[in-house]
Image (cartoon, rainbow, N blue to C red):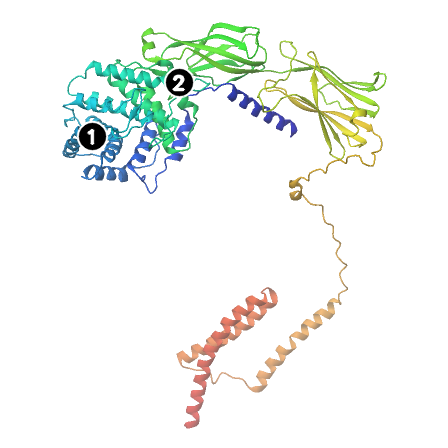
Amino acid sequence: MAARNLSGFLVLVLVIAISEAASVFHPITDAHRSSALDLFTPLDGSFSSLEEAYEALRSFEILGIDKKPDLRSATCHSVLETLGSSSSSPKDLYHALRVNGILKCGVKEELFEGIVSGLKAIVSSASSLLEFYYSIGSLALIRDQSSNVNVLLSDAAGVFRSIKALSQSDGRWRYGSNNPESSTSAAGLAFKALAGVISLASSEIDQAMLGTLKNDISKLFDSVEKYDDGAFYFDEKVVEAHEHQGPLSTTSSVVRGITALADVTSGNIKLPGDKILGLAKFFLGIGVPGDTKDFFNQIDSLASLENNRVSVPLILSLPATVLSLSKKDQLKVKINTVLGSNAPPLTVKLVRASRSGSKDGSIIESQDLKFDKESDSHFLDLPKTVDVGKFLFVFEVALHDSELEKVYATGGQTQVPVFVTGFIKVENAEIAVLDSDLGSVESLKKLDFAGENIVSLSANHLQKLRLSFQLTTPLGLAFKPHQLVKKLVRLQVFLKLRHETKVEHIFVVGNSGKKFEILLDFLGLVEKFYYLSGSYDIELTVGDAVMENSFLKAIGKIELDLPEAPEKAPRPPLQPVDPYSRYGPKAEISHIFRAPEKRPPKELSLAFLGLTFVPLVGFLIGLLRLGVNFKNFPSSAVPATFAILFHLGIAAVLFLYVLFWLKLDLFTTLKVLGFLGAFLLFVGHRILSHLASSSAKLKSA
């Protein structure tokens, strides 16, 4: 149990160490697909709004989820109702059209024509950014859903200038002409609205206007923020903004806007590849959000990055960042898009690999990884010069087709921390009891940690205990367990002495560079040991995240003879009681039953049983003496039936008495007897009434 706990602890520390050192980004996995089904759960077959319905449907579509809830019936009804209502706002129409683009609810062309005329009127008179955004977005959606409706803007340049008038000098935008506050999130909405204007323009937009957009995007990217792991994100600057958005929502808005612009400008607007890759890392570094809105923003933004025509980010990931020398693990690298699609033909180069925090130089330089088609990964066999430890691997991706460099963003060099583990040898291990005055060896025992040998030692308070051993790596170098996580825990070598009363003492074994050694002077430890003489169990713990054979080993026992405790000496602490012991097996209870009392002879019991039948025999004899006959038994059908039921009821009562004697309890018997009594009372009254009536007729006759 202790060894299992130790190994689990080391794995936990290793995971924390890697996550703190640097983030390793991975494309979207099946965890997002299962989470999408859990998050987007409709209530009674529908969502509370069309916006929520679109976010669910779009997330399912991007992730390729086929087994999704059936939303078509209720959602399409809401779509048709919204599109057919004259009171629907541009926002309502926008969400309804987005849902219709996925579900294909069968909207008629006449309905589209009526919506288009109203939307064009709103665009021509709009004064706020949101009015432009929803109206132009709705027109673009109708263009994609119907080819027979004219959605082109006759004055696209004027609409372009109206939206551009809301821009600010720092690349951000205002939500309206009456709102002086600018917003980064509003910039994303403006870019997407302008992309819609360009796509709906009846004539080509002036290139000078597109040039101003390039300048706006450049200024906006000047304000992008960066994490240490290479992830870029946008955040709102103004705290007093009308609707403050978080980094995820803000970055998502900007990504949708700039990718939409890049798609409609045919390469006129260039996106910075390194920052686009950094934005992708930001979304991937979030993990799996637990909120539906955050989940949709993440997935939809990644889809926008993957499908844009200018700068598609490629993600370098390692299936495993812990490699075992004993298992001869290969270094494997995968290159995918953010949604997990395969990358174009390319070469992955290991620029260098060096030990983290070391100044010895690189252990691997300029190695091209081989490509495995089956696993779609690049791999490299670790050279024999690689030892255990923490390393920093630097990779570089080179596309085979130089034209693809204009489309894909590889991000230059990528640094990934890698841990190399292996078996550590324990050599020259010995434990000895030394004389305190002369330092001579009183007794010396060799230790074999691979075996089951248990040593037995004895010492008094005037002696010392010394333990020493060496640790060597697979390459034969001295190994020193080291600190992996700053300010969290320091992995060391521990020596534990446990008294027979369960009082424990733990000591850190020091390292002198060549070997580990600890010297316990019992004279200075008598107070720490609470003057407890007796047997102590000795345990040694050796562990490190890169050490595959970390162990907790019982070395043996030592019998300590310590002086008597002074009057004011500290007493050992009370040992905690295991709360689970109260639920364990209890001591067996042995009970001696008293001897059975002496019973009467069998003949006497049988004689008593015979006497119980005497009243029955007397009853039968009495009936014969009284001259019982059946002359008065009714001859008519109804009275005869009641007479028969009356006698059967009496027989049932007698049979109930027999059952009570054999098996029934008193309460059951009384319940049944109550029903039988009521029955006898009814039938008995009827038959006695008949007999009384017959007797009265005879007397009168």
Name the residue beneath numbered marker 2: 278
- In the rendered image, is residue 360 in sight? yes
State the image coordinates of residue 569 (x, y, percent, origin top left).
80, 34
User: Residue 424's image quarter?
Assistant: top right
Specify the amino acid type for callout 2: Gly
Front position among marks 1 and 2: 1
* Residue 686: quadrant of the picture: bottom left
Q: Nearer the viewer, residue 364 or 592?
A: 364
Q: Quadrant of residue 106?
A: top left
Residue 63 visible at all: no
SS assignment at label 1: loop
Frontmost residue, 402 versus 206: 206
The tag on residue 222 is none
Compared with residue 566, is residue 699 higher up or lower down, i.e. above or below?
below
Neighbor class of circle 2 (other Cα within 10 Å; few <14, some 14-19, many 20+) is many
Q: Which residue is mark 1?
A: 126
Quarter holding the N terminus is top right
Could you tell whether 506 is left or right of 617 in the image? right
* Residue 207 image point, x, y percent: 21, 14
Instruction: Kindly identify the amino acid type of the residue bearing the numbered disc 1.
Output: Ala
The CA span between labels 1 and 2 is: 35 Å
Q: Earlier in the sequence, mark 1 or mark 2?
A: 1
- Mark 2 lies on a secondary structure that is helix
> Could you tell me residue 598's position as x and y percent?
77, 64
What x and y, as percent, mark residue 31? 43, 28
